[in-house]
Image (cartoon, rainbow, N blue to C red):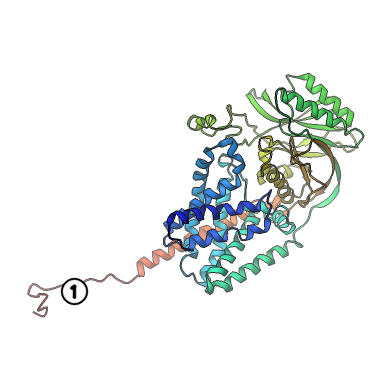
Amino acid sequence: MRTASPWWRGASAVAAGALPALAFPSPSLWWLAYAALVPWMLLIRSEPTGRRAALDGWLGGIGFVIAVHHWLIPSLHVFIVVLAALLGLLWALWGWLVHAVLGGAPSAGRAAVALAVLPSGWLMIELVRSWEGLGGPWGLLGASQWEVSPALRLASVGGVWLVSLLVVAVNTALTLLISVPRARGAAAAGLVTCAVTVGSVMWWPPEPERSGLARIAVVQPGVVAGAGSVEHRFARGEELTRTLTGQDLDLVVWGESSVGSDLAARPDLAARIAVLSRTVDAGILVNVDARSTDPSGRAGIYKRGVLVGPNGPTGDVYDKMRLVPFGEYIPARAVLGWVTSVGKAAGEDRIRGTQQSVMVLPGEGRGGLRFGPLICFESSFPDMSRRLVRDGAQVLVAQSSTSSFQGSWAPEQHASLAALRAAETGRAMVHATLTGVSAVFGPNGEQVSDEIGTDRSAAAVFDVPLARGTTLYARFGDWAVHGALAVLAMFFAVEGGARSLRRRTGPAPHVPPARTARESAARPWR
């Protein structure tokens, strides 16, 4: 793995870090995820020092961040390189860790340690960068497995975190098989353990029990641009919704920012939506992107889900809580506000909501269906969907847009996250967008009917399977993360103790014998 020039090694690290991006939509080479880290790990372990290994980790992290988020380049321009350089520092620690456990000629015991420690170290990176202010949990390695049934079952046990642990463990085992002959037995045992784990979760964890169907329609107006686009989008949404008359619906979902004015300030718009509700005989969940005031008196621009029934807004509203960094607010605007001059960053910070809510459909019969709303970016956070299900949501509904990223990988990547959230919670999830991709996934993460692609302006009805019961992830939460933390704590405690012991019990330094006053180098016996 050695190359003559450090520049070539640096470029190789960047390219190796970018490779896992191909496992995500839209390439969707999901199988590549299980070997995509191997070139990067081989490069790191071949470095002569931990410092050089950390550099490889940092450069690879830069490549990973840019590759997974490359669709942000038109919005952030050169600033994406700055962000990638900052986030890439997380992988510098991982590079050092890879070198610490795999560098040189590790024993079989050291290899076994690596199979637990390196996946745990990777998971800590995913956990830290999942903080909203650092971009949120987009591009988690486990999310690349959104269409693989065994991986979705694994997600129902330990969330997307457990899937990430499995993927990195397989990469670690393959690295050992290729580069450390004395550790091949341990690597093979690790692969067998992974296979047995995946096989076992296919039958022993409890599955959500199916409890009926909900008829939910998604209205996707498509790309509407130019002067008056907000009004034209609303009119197109009305037109598509009318085509759903007589479809025996429970709920109609419009995408994010489908209404451009506060309904309290525009009762005419609220009345038009109420007429649609009566026409299709179903509640309509719209999304208001406008300047408004919340009940506590806070004024500003909100992203707000509003449920409208035949008599107008029902009173069920949800204000987006987790905002997109730079897209909807500027972190530390006093310092980073200059970003607005080089990209399409938010000129004004949106106002964030304060709590999640479960909405209830009005009416008799199948009225009373409880669903949990999420808005755009929030569908990437496992804890938010889990909270909604624990609060009683029977269906998860995400309203999204991605209008700015047409023609990129972003729409497919965003829609795929709904499969993970459905599998984790055992509840179907509806992902409704303005411009695609709109899709619905069942309680096991399976796709329900065909998606509505980015090339369509359409309304579609989905028979959404309902379920009751709870998954192990919904019940116990992020136990896989806590386990990874415990593994790393134990590793560093043992390593620190071993080094301390070596310092105390190592051979005494050589000290030349003392000489008497009459001795000399030539006649020491005198």
Q: Is residue 22 visible?
A: yes
Is 122 on the left or on the right of 157, as rendered? left
Is 408 on the left or on the right of 426, as rendered? left
Is 183 on the left or on the right of 252, as rendered? left
- The total number of labels drawn is 1
**Residue found 51% across the figure and 49% down from its top:** 90
Q: Is residue 396 visible?
A: no
Comparing 141 with 499, the one in front is 141
Q: Which residue is mark 1?
A: 513
Q: Amino acid at mark 1?
A: Pro
Is 376 on the left or on the right of 505, as rendered? right
| Residue located farthest toward the right when viewing the structure as drawn | 246
Tell me which corner region of the image, top left, top right, bottom left or bottom right, holds residue 236.
top right
Badge 1 density bin: few <14, some 14–19, many ≥20, Cα 10 Å: few
Q: Secondary structure at mark 1?
A: loop
Tell me which corner region of the image, top left, top right, bottom left or bottom right, holds residue 389.
top right
**Residue found 82% across the figure and 22% down from its top:** 271
Comparing 230 with 155, the one in front is 230
The spot of residue 318 in percent (x, y) is 71, 32
The spot of residue 143 in percent (x, y) is 66, 51
Tell me which corner region of the image, top left, top right, bottom left or bottom right, holds residue 266.
top right
The spot of residue 485 in percent (x, y) is 55, 55
**Which part of the image, by quadrant, shows the C terminus?**
bottom left
Comparing 356 with 162, the one in front is 162
The spot of residue 418 in percent (x, y) is 72, 46
